[in-house]
Amino acid sequence: MNDRTNQPKSAARRATRAGIFSFNFIALLFILACFVPPLVAVPLRIYIVTDLEGASGVYKFAQTREPGHPLGEKAKEYLMGDIAAVVRGLRSANVFDIVVIDGHGSQAFIPHLMEPGARYITGKPRPGPLTGLDDSFTGLIQLGAHAMMGTPDGVLCHTQSSRSENRYWYNGIESGELAQCAPIAGHYGIPTIMVTGDEATCREATKFFGPDCVAVAVKRGISREAAELYPFDETHQALYEGARRAVAAIPKCKPYKLSLPIQAKKEYLVFDSPSGKGRRISKEGTIEDVLKLMNF
């Protein structure tokens, strides 16, 4: 009898407590809205360094070595198509601050083919290999890259110079251009989030940067100047989708860093005469500043 009598009173007390809780919760939300500044997402900044040898449709040195060569001019168009696909992919993933730097030695940008929504750096001299890069960027993309010198299935593989066949070791690990650009970005805490090129380049990217770095293959190497090429519609779609995945992968990607001081070794050919066979020589030294890595 007493239990039944107390039930309405208990229900009333619960309703009163719920009302007080709701009122306090609403009041708290009001106070937060008035006095706590809203959290604003930091805009993503992506830095893209390009090369020419790893672009869609490029597979022989006649396309990359000689400025003004008809095959080279066409190869530049291929590169611009790859860049456009990546820029579109980044923008569709809400990246609206994109810097693209021309990393090919003889320069490879065609201004009238520049995809809107990014800023483009080209021409020489420049103050450094990755001009303008600083810790305000969120990720690095290496686009149109190639495998290091000596890679059997690497299309146009080389490191810095294909003519003198340079090879480099840092702290005992042979490294190509992928692992030369990445530690400069790593100095600023920036991870390499995406690499594009042939299958050998993608394999090299995974070795150095791990599986979370998005690797997009736009061709498969058969030998140094032979490749299985893929239609541009397919490679551009893969690059677009890869750029979107790279943005999502940013939290998982880690900056690539080298322990200082860097114990460096370089091997290269010296030619005593233009038609003579080159002599392979080597040098070793210590690099104290990773930003001077390319000076060795």
Image: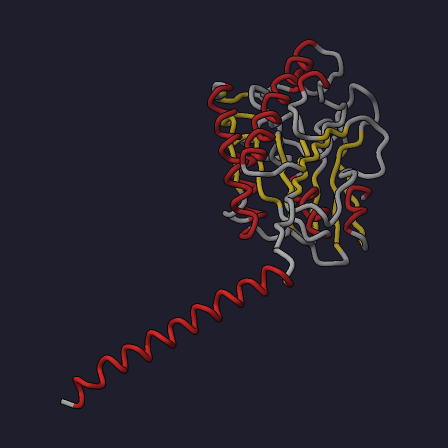
Residue at far top of view: 70
| Residue 162 appears left or right of 254 | right
Identify the residue shown where x is 50% and y is 47%.
Answer: 211
The one nearer the camera, 187 or 205, is 187
- In this picture, is 51 found above or below 32? above
In the picture, which quadrant includes the N terminus?
Answer: bottom left
Where residue 58 appears, x then y in whole percent? 59, 20
Where residue 81 appears, x then y in whole percent? 59, 21
Q: Quadrant of residue 12?
A: bottom left
| Residue 119 appears left or right of 17 | right
Residue at far bottom of view: 2
Q: Is residue 224 visible?
A: no
Which color scheme is applied? Answer: secondary structure
Identify the residue shown where x is 72% and y is 28%.
Answer: 104
Identify the residue shown where x is 79% and y is 48%.
Answer: 291
| Residue 44 appears left or right of 230 | right
Identify the residue shown where x is 70% and y is 39%.
Answer: 167
Where residue 70 appears, x then y in whole percent? 69, 9
